[in-house]
Structure formats: C-alpha cells, structure tokens
Amino acid sequence: MGERTVTTLEGREQTAPAPQPVTDEAEDRARQGLLRRLRTPRRPRFWFEILLIAVSYWTYSLIRNAVPEQKAEALGNADWVWRLENHLGIAVEDAVNHTTNSVTWLIVGMNYYYATLHFVVTLGVLVWLFRSHPGRYAATRLALFATTAVALLGYYFFPLAPPRLMNGGGFVDTVVVHQTWGSMASGDLKHMSNQYAAMPSMHIGWSLWCGLTIFALTTVPWVRILSLLYPVATLVVIVATANHFWLDAVGGMVCLTFGFTVAWLWYGALPYALPRLVTGAGAPALLPART
C-alpha cells in the first residue's frame, strides 16, 4: 500500500496510508451486476411495452419510408431476381398470380389478408406472450425487433420492385384490378410508403416469428398446426398478390435468424428455452423451461 506524509496539530510529521481509489475490480463487479439484471427475465410493464412498440414501429416506418425510392435500380434488381429464379427453376410467381386472380373471392380475400393479418396476428401474439409467458416476453420481443431492424439494411442497400411493378413482367396488381385496399404500396396509398422495399419480406419474417412462437409455447395440438400453417399461407398470399418474389421470403427468414441470434446472445438461450416466470404468494420467481 502507498503511504503519504502528514503534519499533525503539534507540528510533527508522520506517515499515513494513502487513500486508495476505487478499484477496477469493484467497477467490473458493478457493471456485471447491472448487466446481469438487464439479462434476467422479469415481468414486463404494460404501459412501457405499449410505448416501446408504438415508438419502435413508428421509427421503423419512418426509416423505411425515408429510404430513397431508387426506381431504376429497384426495377433492375427485380429483373435480376426474376432471371435468377428462372435459372433456379423456381420462377412460378406469375402462374400463381394469374391462377388466383381468376378466382375473385379468393384474391380479394388474399388482398385483405395481406393488409391486415400482418399486424393483427403479430400484435395478438405479443399480447398473449405478455399475459401468458412474461418471463419469455422480453427475449421473444427482442428477436422480433432485431429481425425488423436488420430488414432496414436490405431496403437501403438492395431496393427491389415487387413483381406487380416490373416492366413487362406480366403480373397482375390485384389491388388495382379488384379495387381493394391490400397494401400500403398500392393504389391510392402508394405515396405513403416506399414501393421499392420488397427485400426482405417482413410479412414472412413476422408470420414465421408468430408461428414458431405459438408452436413452441402452446400444447394444444390444433393450435400448433394452425401456427405452422400461418406462415405457409402468408407465403402463398405474398406471391399470389404479386407483392413479393420467393427470394424475398428467403430474405425474411434470414432476418429472423439474425433476430433469434441476437436474443440468444443477449439472454444466453433461445427465448423459448428461458425459465417461465411465475408470480404469486408462495410461488417461485422462475420455473425451469419446459423441454
């Protein structure tokens, strides 16, 4: 230990231990304690979550729509994706589009499906998580937010026109033809949204997040079956309405993989494997995760 010389009231000098600064070890322990608290599953606060979701979606929409609409590049990228899919032998979007468009009630229903369930089901799953699985809510919500955030990179660096806007693609814009509202980038609403943000497809990213979450956390057989059918139906809808290519769906899956990776790195486990939070008199704070 260091020493210093001090002068007493009588005028005599003597040595005394020097004051020790706060050690780096103590600071590290404090930081680790804060990090551990942030990474510990806890019951979410209702009003904070409402505010967080509203602000996050507003920010996402603002940034997505602020990306310059690079029409020439977006159309060129659409032609490239279409050629690639033809090369891979998966370019059947035009056949799906024309076949479903010939059945009026079906395609009109798909237009409304595309416009509404994207939001309704996702918000419904968030509410269900909040009420029934509060200990897993934050981690699962983080996976969804990270998925949505990384999609912005695709919109910025790879502007892509949807099939219905391709030059000479022969696709039917089902919203315009049937005069429904089915997309914020169609009809009279097209000036409110970036029309060339098709890659990746967040309809697939979000629907797959919903499907996996419900499948992993419920035990009701028919509900689990429906949870897996939901992203499959969404895939058919986005192609039938000519809003996306198959490869846009692959981009959505890649973004979702990134989102779950972020949640896993932060919480040390996949969201569905975290302990279940239980509250109430005499109940433990956490129960082991269901295998």
Image (cartoon, rainbow, N blue to C red):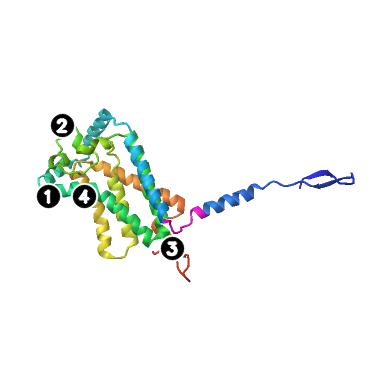
Q: Residue at x 12, y 44 (%)?
A: 101
Callout 1: SS: helix
Residue 41 drawn in magenta: yes
Q: Residue at x 29, y 65 (%)?
A: 220
CB within 8 Å, label 3 to label 1: no
Name the residue carrying label 4: 113
Q: Earlier in the sequence, mark 1 or mark 4?
A: 1
Kind of residue at badge 4: Tyr
Separation (CA) of disc 1 from disc 4: 12 Å
| Magenta-tinted stretch | 37-45
Name the residue carrying label 2: 168
- Please tell me in which quadrant of the rendered image residue 277 appears: bottom left
Q: Callout 1: 10 Å neighbours few (<14), some, many (20+)?
A: few
Kind of residue at badge 3: Leu
Q: Residue furthest front?
A: 47
Residue 105, disc: 1
**In the depicted structure, whether residue 263 falls above or below residue 74:** below
Callout 3: SS: strand
Q: Position of residue 219 (x, y in %)?
A: 31, 65
Name the residue carrying label 3: 277
